[in-house]
Amino acid sequence: MEKVTESSRIRTHVDKDLKWGPCPAFMPDGCTIAVLHGDPSKENVDVFFKVPANYEIPAHWHNSVERMVLVSGELHVTYEGEKEQLMKVGSYAFGPSTKPHSAKCGSKDPCVLFIAFEEPLDAIPVVMKQ
């Protein structure tokens, strides 16, 4: 068995030492991401994704599956071809790779999602046909 040189870590979404950065340009102002573990340009990255109350997350998709747990707020999530679902604190969600989805944060509290990506982190906006 190889000796593990990496340190363990425990984080919450309110830790003062988290480094919050911007979301992709197609997301409205107010969206931020904090990398918890890994390198966003490589496989297996974990992030916190945060948006304000009443925030609309535009339709988009990822090359990776995403495994999510809501840690703050209430989030209404809609995957293409499926009914809207409500995530409450502690809810787990699995998002298939390349499946378009959108969401809206509830009106009471900001929404923070823990998201684990298997592939490098990306978010591709869905171009609406006219």
Image (cartoon, rainbow, N blue to C red):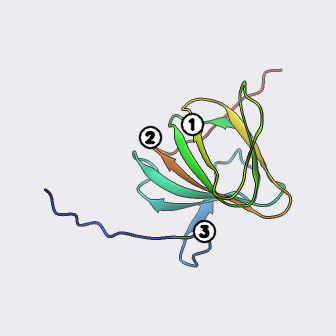
Instruction: Name the residue rendered at 29%, 66% in the picture.
Output: 6
Pointer 3 local density, CA inside 10 Å: few below 14, some 14–19, many at least 20? some
**Residue 61: percent from left, percent from top:** 62, 35
Task: Give the residue furthest to the top.
Answer: 130
Q: In the structure shown, which secondary structural element does the residue marked by tag 2 occupy?
A: loop
Q: Nearer the viewer, residue 83 or 114?
A: 83
Instruction: Name the residue rendered at 69%, 35% in the picture.
Output: 101
Q: Residue 119 — which label?
A: 2
Instruction: Name the residue rendered at 57%, 29% in the picture.
Output: 98
Q: Is residue 57 visible?
A: no
Q: How far apart are marks 2 and 3 (CA)?
A: 23 Å
Cβ atoms under marks 1 and 2 closer than 8 Å: yes
Amino acid at circle 2: Glu
Amino acid at circle 1: His
Q: Residue 13 — which label?
A: 3
Task: Give the residue furthest to the bottom.
Answer: 16
Amino acid at circle 3: His
Q: State left or right for residue 75 relative to residue 62.
A: right
Q: Which of marks 1 and 3 is in front?
A: 3
Ranked by sequence position, the earlier of labels 2 and 3 is 3
**Residue 127: percent from left, percent from top:** 72, 28
Q: How far apart are marks 1 and 2 (CA)?
A: 9 Å
Q: Say which residue label 1 marks.
A: 62
Instruction: Name the residue rendered at 60%, 41% in the picture.
Output: 123
Q: How far apart are marks 1 and 3 (CA)?
A: 23 Å
